[in-house]
Structures are given as C-alpha cells and as structure tokens.
C-alpha cells in the first residue's frame, strides 16, 4: 500500500514546487491582474507557436502551469512537465522546435536559438512585425529539458526589437528550476 501511494504521489508536480506559486497564492486587489494555477496534465504548452493543443502532449505523466496576466498587455508563465522518459521529453522539445520553424505569419514571426541550460534548451522569440520591421508586441521564452522534465518560462508584453537581454528573467528562473528539478525528474 505504501509503495502504491509513493507511485501515485510521484505522478504529480506537487503544489508549491514552482517558483511563482507563492506570488500566485497572494490576494491581489487589482482586478486587472490575475493568476491561474493548474495541475492539468494535458495543459497546452505555454509556448505554442501553432496553437495546437496536442503539441508536446505524448508521453506526459504530470504537469503544473502558472500564468500571470496583467491587462491589457503583459503576461508571464511558468510550466513544469514530466514525461515518461527522457526520450519522450526530448521528442516534445523537437516538436516545439519544428513548430517554431513552421508557424507564424508575416505580422508575427517566431525564431529560436540554442542556449546552454540543462540537457538541452532553446530561447524562443515571438515578435510582432509591421511592414517587415519589429513592431511593439511579442513573447520571449526559455524552454529547457533535464532528463524527463520540460521547464518553460515566458514573458509577453510590449517588446520592441528582440535582444538577448529580453531573456534574462526567464534564463534566471529556468536555471533556478533546473537546480531543483531532480527532486521530481529521473536525473
């Protein structure tokens, strides 16, 4: 019976494990600010250029997602997803990289760059364009994998022309989570 409880507990990302959970638990009196916390295993990736709910879904065993929104134009999110194996997590990263290459429009484009975090990681830039020039609006994300875990941090808002400094908060958060993810992942 104890072994069954241990297995059941290991199939979820526990509450208060994510970095933003303490902030999400606080009452914010501003009605234009909201936090959404979910433990739904089938949650859509917070970085999803093609807006396909099935992206990175195969092989998932658990997920926890936190999204903060400040109306009208700012959001940040944190997502930790556990997969059945490191190969399944690597496949999810591959699917995401393909989506970054193939999705987008003339008015909103995606790009990616590898970064040295975890076993593999990618910086994803979503950027609004007007007549071929960067316009106001976009998203900056870090997606990192360690073993069978996928870690995603995003910030979206009134970005201008993409710059490496746009990723500083997401890289810091990803590094912090990568340092503790082996408490859950099969490292």
Image (cartoon, grey):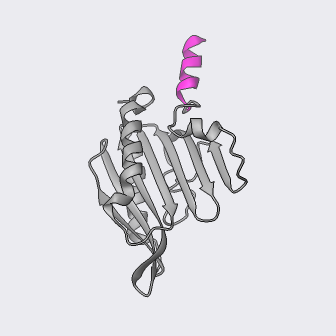
Left or right? Give the position of 94 relative to 66.
left
Please give the name of the residue rendered at 43% of the width and 26% of the height, measured from the top-left corner.
Answer: 183
Outermost residue, top side: 2
Number of numbered discs visible in the structure rendering:
0
| Residue 87 visible in the shown view | no
Question: Residue 137 location in percent, x, y?
Answer: 50, 71
Q: Which residues are magenta?
A: 1-12
Q: Quadrant of residue 66?
A: top right
Left or right? Give the position of 168 relative to 35.
left
Left or right? Give the position of 184 relative to 122.
right
Relative to 156, residue 149 above or below: above
Between residues 67 and 1, which one lies in front from this camera angle? 67
Relative to 46, residue 149 above or below: above
Between residues 65 and 70, which one lies in front from this camera angle? 70
Quarter that holds the C terminus: top left
Quarter that holds the N terminus: top right
By secondary structure, the bulk of the magenta-drawn segment is best described as helix
Question: Residue 20 location in percent, x, y?
Answer: 54, 40
Between residues 187 and 14, which one lies in front from this camera angle? 14
Outermost residue, left side: 116
Please give the name of the residue rendered at 51% of the width and 46% of the height, measured from the top-left corner.
Answer: 78
Outermost residue, bottom side: 131
Please give the name of the residue rendered at 57% of the width and 53% of the height, measured from the top-left corner.
Answer: 44
Question: Residue 69 location in percent, x, y?
Answer: 61, 55
């Amino acid at each position: 019976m104890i072994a069954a409880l241990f297995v059941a507990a290991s199939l979820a990302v526990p509450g208060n494990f994510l970095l933003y959970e303490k902030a999400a638990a606080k009452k914010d009196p501003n009605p234009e600010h909201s936090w959404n916390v979910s433990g739904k295993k089938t949650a859509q990736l917070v970085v999803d250029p093609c807006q396909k709910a099935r992206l990175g879904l195969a092989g998932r065993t658990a997920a926890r997602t936190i999204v903060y929104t400040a109306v009208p134009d700012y959001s940040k999110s944190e997502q930790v997803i556990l997969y059945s194996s490191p190969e399944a997590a690597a496949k999810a990263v591959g699917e995401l990289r393909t989506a970054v290459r193939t999705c987008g429009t003339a008015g909103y484009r995606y790009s990616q760059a590898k970064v040295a975090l975890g076993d593999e990681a990618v910086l994803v830039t979503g950027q609004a364009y007007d007549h071929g020039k960067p316009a106001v609006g976009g998203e900056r994300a870090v997606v990192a994998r360690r073993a069978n875990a996928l870690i995603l941090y995003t910030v979206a808002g009134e970005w201008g022309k993409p710059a490496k400094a746009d990723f500083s908060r997401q890289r810091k958060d990803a590094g912090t989570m990568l340092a503790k993810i082996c408490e859950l992942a099969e490292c």
